[in-house]
Amino acid sequence: MIFDTFSIVCSLVALFILLLAWLFNPFRRRIFNAEANEDATDNPPLSLVIITQGNAQALEENLPLWLTQRYNADLQIIVVTDEGDHYADDVLKRIATTHDIHRTFVPQTSRYMSRTKLAVTLGVKAAHHQMVMLVNADCSPASDLTLALLVQANNPSSCTMVMPLSHYQEPCKGFYQFEHLHRSLYYMHSAVSGAAYGSNSNSLLFCKDMFMQGQGFLGSLHLIGGEYEILTNRYATREETSVFVNPKAQLIQQTPSRHIWRNRAVAAWEIRRHLKHGFITRLTYITDQIVLHLSYIALIGLAVASGITQHWISLGVAAFLFLCLLFTRIIQARKVIRQLDIKINTFLIPIYELRIIWHNAMTALLHKFTDKIEFTCHKL
């Protein structure tokens, strides 16, 4: 009998698995809740705070791009450097001859607290305007409308937080770019859902009063890194947080070396231990990974079992649905990647998706065997 019970049941199970794989996909979920008008001219005054983190070379490359933004309102530029950073001093002196730049610095005597968090605090305190755009020096705007579009994405009825999207500067390894985007999808979806878990971008637009009244990084000043994750997790709310996606409003981050990329991933693992809303985001991620891997295992297992038992109909169905699974994942990812104008080889998406869990497992293992004192400023 060609269409026996085994073939029918296995085919239905395989079809159900394919449906689950389509549903549990981060590329299918909503990741933005705000829009902006490129022609709008009613921008509020803005303070742009740039944190150098000792990266004066990136400051030299990217600061001119921020200074040429088309912003139809008062734009205050604040650069926070380390005391004694002569390279940054030279860069600012050259640019200050043609532009008005406010500079403040982190004293060398600061101890027992994160220097970057102190730099952010000093920069926000120096801001003259309510709206503050915070960026690292290694970030550059995707266009000359980046600031205007991000501010337009702000809810006009209240001073809100706007989460921009970022990607790595080309040339960049495909998996680096994919991993960065993949993590951003979960962060952005959590914010849209009203339970912001964190941010994967070295940039954030927020209200100064919100930061000052909430006492900034109080309770996490000892942690190294995670400034944007902590700010988003602590201050983002459902009603007053905008997640904005537009290729012209994206931030382009300097591509890290393998060593820096790995260290950031391990440090981020530690930061997540101190964030709220983690259960839902982690549960979503784990469910996605379980469904994805079980889909491949089940379809391959069905094909092998059908071949051994000579059920050629179910073998053909399993092979066809396996191809459907591959192309479905590629098509769903390609739609988002094209919308965001990020350069990733979409035909490698299935490989990157399967690699993610092993990358995270290795990161978790490295974190487990790293002395936790390395993640704090409380070192002797």
Image (tube, rainbow, N blue to C red):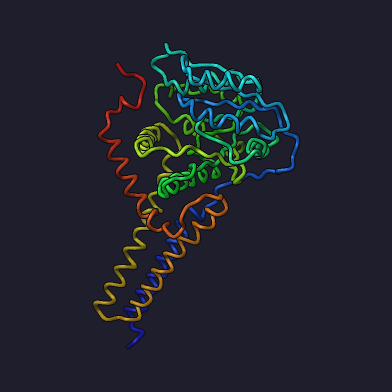
Which of 159/119 is in front? 119
Place residue 14 in its image quadrant. bottom left
Which residue is rendered at x = 57% and y = 25% of the image?
49
Which of 174/363 is in front? 174
Looking at the image, residue 140 sits to the left or right of residue 35; the answer is left
Q: How many marks are shown on the rendered structure?
A: 0
Q: Residue furthest top?
A: 109
Which residue is rendered at x = 54% and y = 42% of the image?
165
Residue 100: give x, y in percent of width and height. Answer: 65, 20
Q: Quadrant of the C terminus?
A: top left
Task: Using the rendered image of the protein, determine whether residue 378 is visible from the camera's viewpoint.
Answer: yes
Which residue is rendered at x = 66% and y = 22% of the image?
98
Which residue is rendered at x = 37% and y = 53% of the image?
289
Residue 328: give x, y in percent of width and height. Answer: 47, 64
Residue 231: give x, y in percent of width and height. Answer: 51, 30
Q: State whether residue 326 is above or below residue 129.
A: below
Q: Quadrant of the N terminus?
A: bottom left
Residue 364: give x, y in percent of width and height. Answer: 31, 40
Looking at the image, residue 93 sits to the left or right of residue 18; the answer is right
Which of 82/243 is in front? 82
Q: State whether residue 118 is above or below residue 131.
A: above
Q: Residue furthest bottom?
A: 1
Task: Using the rendered image of the protein, determine whether residue 234 is visible from the camera's viewpoint.
Answer: no
Looking at the image, residue 37 sits to the left or right of residue 201; the answer is right
Which of 72/67 is in front? 67
Q: State whether residue 167 is above or below residue 133.
A: below
